[in-house]
């Protein structure tokens, strides 16, 4: 359940405004607004006192002393948009992405805690979250039950103590996503215990079931899953609805399936829009140039979805599903004063944004209302070792071949190094995963990444360890050295010259700056990679998922080269 934020004296002051003994902070007069329960556009006056709506209807306040009265005749008002499935660590950080997303009307995140779980003790993570809570934005969190890769110390990170500390938080509203669900089928009662404990505390459980059969979906429902965001077709949607799931439709940088799924739902005349949500599912920065949840609404409108259904999928449906409709997703008395003011319902990118009673955007201009937060709880990535030629030696006959951005398969290595360099006549590159503290390494070859990338180093990975890719050992070493100087980042080098880079100074994985600035740097990097033969859609996700064992087929992990299907290490990591 969402946390109530108003003290007795706050509520008494709100009642005094109704009685005319005090004045509201803001009144939105003559507002044409969406009432999500009536599923209708109404016209009335919205009274706001500080961060709360205290009245919606035909009346005007008796007392308007120092009240900001805004006549919205001709405008349309909808609830602030909710992103129900955010990975707020895709180069950007939770603060910068919230600041960015708010400008297009997304004012609430339900966010992944994975980076916190892997990088920080809970006390330090919670200190950052408390800073985020002070912003005029709404953050809610998931708690992860597994690392999504193979870690030697996973049992020390994902403990009863750690997970229950997250579950005790009122702003943790779900468990998942369940990337480790095969463990349930294999009899993992520890994972089942965490799921059941979360449900007893009123939390939802989010699945991660791409391509799952009806039998698997039924089993996962019995285990406790409430929702799933992995539908890729309208048939997937129907299968999940049939089993009682809440379904979140996805439009992301690696799965832009939303238009086709909406078309299928409309073509089949499925009356299920009350049970659907939408998400951009942690897309990379450049993808968000066109928006966040406003982009999803726009796509729904273009597909022919009733505007009221489109807006509800991005606000009220989410709030109702998470039992937060007394605070979010509804323009009604008692809710947060979080509203988007639109030209009309066919233009979902707002002209003005009010979040918890604070203007974040007015007259299409940003209002700087976010105060900076302190990221010092993330230790700097101080790499204290150098690479040697020994770090590039390997005898593994099996390499990793990219099927697409994120799916991989094994292949037999046939090429050899010639004077520390591979030919550019093929798309095979050296691949090294190396411990950020220099203790171990894993070596193989990567096929399908690029033909002409000479040296590439990144600390942006699933686990925060270092990935090295390239054709030339000297250029790989140079990229690594430049990354060290940045205290973390992504660096592309050719002939000893830095071609592109992104500094990631927050823990070696996150950019400390505006998303707009980050998009420019990402564009430069992606363009340079494409010029050198990277032909997939999302290089950032490639880096993130090379270690992710929730996807097939073969992965490079801190334990070694890992066969996901057989659940075994094919070649262990070696000590340096």
Image: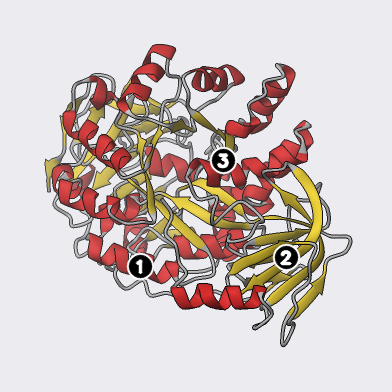
10 Å neighbourhood of mark 2: few (<14), some, or many (≥20)?
many
Real-space Cα separation, disc 3 to disc 2, in angstroms: 37 Å
Residue at 40% across / 71% down in the picture? Answer: 131
Q: Secondary structure at mark 3?
A: loop
**x and y, in percent, of residue 436 in the image:** 23, 55
The residue at which mark 2 appears reads as 46
The answer to whether any part of residue 44 appears in the image is: yes
The answer to whether any part of residue 372 appears in the image is: no
**x and y, in percent, of residue 303 in the image:** 76, 32
Task: Name the foreground residue: 121 vs 170.
Answer: 170
For residue 545, above or below residue 435: above
Real-space Cα separation, disc 2 to disc 1, in angstroms: 33 Å
Mark in the foreground, 2 or 1: 2
The residue at which mark 1 appears reads as 128
Q: Label for residue 349?
A: none
Q: Earlier in the sequence, mark 1 or mark 3?
A: 1
Q: Earlier in the sequence, mark 3 or mark 2?
A: 2
Most extreme residue toward the right, as rendered? 74
Q: Along the horizontal axis of the image, is 342 left or right of 454? A: right
The residue at which mark 3 appears reads as 253
10 Å neighbourhood of mark 3: few (<14), some, or many (≥20)?
many
Residue at 39% across / 44% down in the picture? Answer: 544
Q: Earlier in the sequence, mark 2 or mark 1?
A: 2
Most extreme residue toward the front, as rendered? 19
Q: Along the horizontal axis of the image, is 74 left or right of 507? A: right
Residue at 56% across / 23% down in the picture? Answer: 237
Mark in the foreground, 1 or 3: 1
10 Å neighbourhood of mark 1: few (<14), some, or many (≥20)?
many
């Amino acid at each position: 359940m969402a946390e109530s934020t108003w003290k007795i004296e706050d509520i008494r002051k709100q009642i005094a405004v109704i009685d005319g003994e005090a004045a509201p902070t803001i009144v939105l007069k003559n507002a044409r607004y969406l009432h999500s329960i009536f599923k209708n556009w109404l016209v009335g006056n919205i009274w706001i006192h500080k961060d709360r709506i205290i009245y919606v209807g035909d009346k005007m306040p008796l007392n308007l002393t120092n009240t900001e009265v805004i006549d919205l005749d001709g405008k349309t008002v909808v609830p602030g948009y909710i992103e129900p499935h955010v990975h707020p660590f895709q180069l950007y950080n939770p603060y910068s992405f919230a600041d960015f997303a708010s400008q297009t009307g997304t004012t609430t995140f339900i966010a992944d805690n994975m980076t916190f779980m892997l990088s920080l003790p809970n006390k330090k993570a919670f200190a950052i979250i408390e800073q985020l809570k002070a912003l005029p934005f709404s953050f809610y969190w998931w708690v992860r039950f597994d690392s999504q890769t193979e870690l030697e110390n996973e049992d020390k990170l994902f403990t009863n103590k750690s997970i229950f500390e997250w579950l005790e938080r009122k702003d943790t509203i779900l468990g998942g996503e369940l990337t480790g669900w095969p463990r349930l089928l294999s009899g993992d009662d520890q994972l089942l215990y965490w799921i059941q404990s979360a449900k007893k505390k009123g939390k939802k459980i989010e699945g991660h079931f791409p391509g799952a059969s009806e039998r698997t979906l039924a089993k996962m429902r019995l285990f406790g899953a409430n929702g799933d965001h992995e539908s890729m077709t309208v048939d997937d949607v129907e299968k999940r609805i049939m089993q009682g799931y809440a379904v979140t439709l996805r439009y992301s940088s690696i799965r832009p399936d939303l238009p086709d799924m909406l078309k299928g739902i409309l073509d089949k005349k499925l009356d299920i829009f009350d049970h659907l949500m939408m998400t951009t599912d942690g897309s990379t920065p450049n993808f968000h140039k066109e928006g966040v949840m406003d982009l999803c609404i726009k796509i729904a409108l273009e597909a022919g979805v009733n505007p009221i259904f489109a807006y509800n999928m991005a606000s009220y449906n989410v709030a109702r599903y998470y039992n937060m409709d007394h605070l979010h997703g509804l323009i009604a008395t008692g809710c947060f004063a979080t509203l988007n003011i639109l030209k009309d319902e066919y233009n979902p990118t707002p002209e003005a944004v009010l979040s918890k009673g604070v203007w974040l955007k007015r007259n299409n201009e940003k209002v700087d209302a976010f105060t900076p937060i302190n990221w010092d709880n993330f230790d700097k990535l101080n790499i204290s070792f150098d690479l040697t030629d020994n770090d590039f030696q390997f005898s593994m006959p099996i390499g990793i071949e990219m099927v697409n951005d994120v799916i991989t398969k094994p292949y037999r290595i046939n090429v050899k190094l010639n004077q520390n360099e591979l030919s550019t006549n093929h798309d095979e590159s050296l691949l090294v995963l190396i411990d950020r503290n220099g203790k171990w390494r894993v070596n193989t070859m990567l096929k399908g990444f690029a033909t002409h990338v000479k040296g590439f180093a990144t600390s942006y990975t699933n686990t925060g360890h270092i990935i090295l890719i390239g054709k030339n050992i000297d250029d790989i070493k140079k990229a690594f050295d430049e990354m060290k100087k940045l205290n973390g980042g992504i660096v592309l080098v050719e002939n000893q010259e830095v071609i592109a880079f992104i500094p990631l100074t927050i823990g070696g994985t996150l950019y400390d700056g505006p998303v707009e600035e980050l998009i420019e740097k990402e564009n430069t990097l992606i363009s340079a990679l494409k010029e050198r033969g990277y032909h997939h859609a999302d290089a950032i996700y490639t880096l993130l998922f090379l270690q992710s064992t929730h996807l097939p087929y073969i992965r490079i992990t801190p334990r070694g080269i890992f066969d996901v299907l057989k659940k075994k290490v094919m070649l262990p990591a070696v000590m340096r």
